[in-house]
């Protein structure tokens, strides 16, 4: 079987390595992939958002199954285009990917179907949003409706910050048309949990829970990033909470999408906050999270390709989805200065990895046989172990064995999770 994977980050590398475990896989193509992914897949320089380029590629290369992982091609309708060519895909069609593509859509869905989430108001013009903020309380959460490279959520501590955010999004259009509408949302508190799930539109199977570390600096300080590390499972997400989420959030969301004629097939990501009033949805993603996937897939015991095919066929209820006991930790190595200005082009040296270790490459290119850094987040050093403590130690030990000149990492990935385990 030949498989096409759309995307080129650490998440895609983790997906590709997991797909390769299936003996029927002959070839994996990655568009565009990256210099590190090239060790595991044939990479071609077609952008993930170049839907015409992707379709053209499939006319000259046999593709039996496609996996579309990033948000933008999903929202643009990549799955619809590939399916029109007769290629079965893993990933939602555009009419379901809207659950991530429009925060106004997903908020209205949650309101209509009583799915617990933060209170919020929608605005289509800056003046009414600012008038509303004048009477409101702070912190307030301001969200651009559409995709915004993960930067569309602003937590404003006071009116001035909030007004500035509204003007940037709605008047200066810093996120383009994504800022035509905004949500102003109640500020929630509590531990955050990421739960990725497989769903074929009828059955929903949550994967092992995880915890992201979004800020650039230790102790959750500094700017927001695409994610500096993850651990799985998330110790705050107890079995009791998992049961509650399944009943009040996961199943109702999948049923709601069906009822709206927008059946969701693929990986549905629930960004949850465990508030004093119970678990609430902070955001939906229509795809695997990154770097969550880098700790979730190493713990998957069942075969990923088989599950993906069952999702597409609508037979997930009879497919085995098992996770290993134990834990995993991912420490991201970034270029010093990320998420702002940083230098690239430094050579990366790789160690041998043991069975329980993986290096997932996010930002690297091959030049004259050398692997050079090419992005802000360069790679994820991942270790799995019986306990979270061993996984964290293992991931840091692996990270120490990987080198490039301006490598930067957080030193406290997993610290909060380990403290939560000790408190129990
Ligand atoms: P997102 O870009 O949707 O992942 O949101 C970024 C981050 O903003 C989330 O991970 C939360 O930490 C925070 N956030 C989003 N909505 C809220 C809210 N209503 N209350 C508090 N924090 C929030
Ligand atoms: N780690 C959060 C995301 O993938 O959006």
Image (spheres, rainbow, N blue to C red):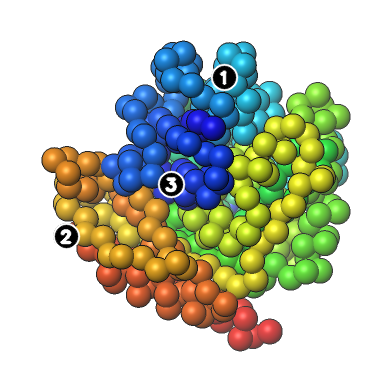
Query: Residue at 57% of width from left, 77% of height from top?
Result: 386
Q: Position of residue 109 (x, y in %)?
A: 77, 35
Q: Is residue 413 left or right of residue 397?
A: right
Local secondary structure at mark 3:
helix
Q: Earlier in the sequence, mark 2 or mark 1?
A: 1
Residue 397 in view, yes or no = yes
Local secondary structure at mark 2:
loop
Please, which residue is most extreme toward the left here?
Answer: 368
Name the disc covering residue 13, or none: 3
Name the disc covering residue 208, or none: none
Local secondary structure at mark 1:
helix
CA distance for labels 2 and 1: 41 Å
Q: Position of residue 86 (x, y in %)?
A: 62, 16
Name the disc covering residue 405, or none: 2
Query: Residue at 21% of width from left, 48% of height from top?
Result: 371
Quadrant assignment, res 219: bottom left
Residue 146 in view, yes or no = no
Check whether the beta carbons of the residues at disc 2 and disc 1 lie within 8 A of each other: no
Rendered position, 422 above or below 381: below
Q: Which residue is mark 1?
A: 82
Q: Earlier in the sequence, mark 2 or mark 3?
A: 3
- Estimate how packed mark 1 is, as few (under 14), some (14 to 19) or many (20 or more) residues with alpha carbons within 10 Å: many
Q: Nearer the viewer, residue 202 or 306?
A: 306
């Amino acid at each position: 079987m030949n498989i096409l994977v759309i995307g080129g980050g650490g998440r895609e590398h983790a997906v590709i390595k997991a797909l390769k475990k299936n003996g029927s896989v002959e070839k994996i193509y990655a568009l565009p992939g990256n210099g590190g992914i090239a060790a595991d897949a044939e990479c071609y320089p077609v952008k993930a958002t170049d839907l015409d380029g992707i379709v053209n590629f499939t006319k000259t290369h046999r593709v039996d199954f496609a996996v579309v992982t990033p948000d933008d091609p999903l929202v643009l309708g990549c799955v619809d285009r590939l399916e029109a060519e007769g290629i079965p895909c893993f990933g939602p069609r555009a009419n379901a990917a809207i659950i991530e593509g429009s925060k106004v859509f997903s908020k209205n869905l949650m309101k209509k179907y009583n799915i617990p989430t933060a209170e919020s108001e929608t605005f289509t013009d800056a003046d009414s949003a600012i008038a509303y903020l004048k009477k409101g309380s702070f912190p307030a959460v301001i969200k651009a409706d559409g995709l915004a490279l993960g930067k569309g959520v602003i937590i404003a501590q006071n009116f001035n910050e909030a007004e500035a955010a509204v003007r940037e999004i709605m008047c200066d259009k810093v996120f383009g048309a994504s800022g035509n509408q905004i949500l102003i949302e109640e500020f929630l508190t509590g531990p955050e949990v990421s739960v990725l799930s497989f769903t074929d539109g009828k059955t929903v199977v949550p994967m092992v829970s995880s915890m992201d570390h979004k800020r650039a600096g230790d102790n959750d300080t500094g700017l927001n990033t695409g994610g500096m590390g993850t651990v799985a499972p998330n110790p705050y997400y107890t079995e009791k909470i998992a049961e509650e989420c399944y009943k009040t959030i996961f199943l109702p969301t999948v049923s709601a999408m069906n009822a709206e004629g927008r059946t969701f097939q693929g990986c549905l990501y629930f960004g949850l906050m465990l508030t004093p009033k119970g678990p609430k949805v902070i955001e939906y993603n229509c795809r695997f999270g990154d770097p969550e996937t880098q700790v979730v897939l190493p713990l998957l015991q069942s075969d990923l390709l088989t599950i993906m095919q069952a999702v597409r066929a609508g037979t997930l209820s009879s497919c085995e989805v098992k996770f290993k006991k134990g834990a995993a930790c991912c420490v991201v190595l970034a270029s010093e200065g990320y998420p702002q200005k940083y230098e690239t082009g430094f050579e990366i040296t790789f160690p041998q990895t043991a069975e329980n270790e993986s290096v997932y490459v996010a930002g690297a290119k091959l030049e004259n046989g050398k692997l050079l850094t090419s992005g802000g987040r360069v790679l994820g050093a991942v270790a799995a172990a019986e306990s979270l403590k061993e996984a964290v130690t293992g991931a840091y030990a692996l990270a120490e064995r990987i080198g490039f000149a301006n490598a930067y990492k957080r030193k406290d990935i997993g610290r909060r999770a380990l403290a939560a385990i000790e408190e129990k």
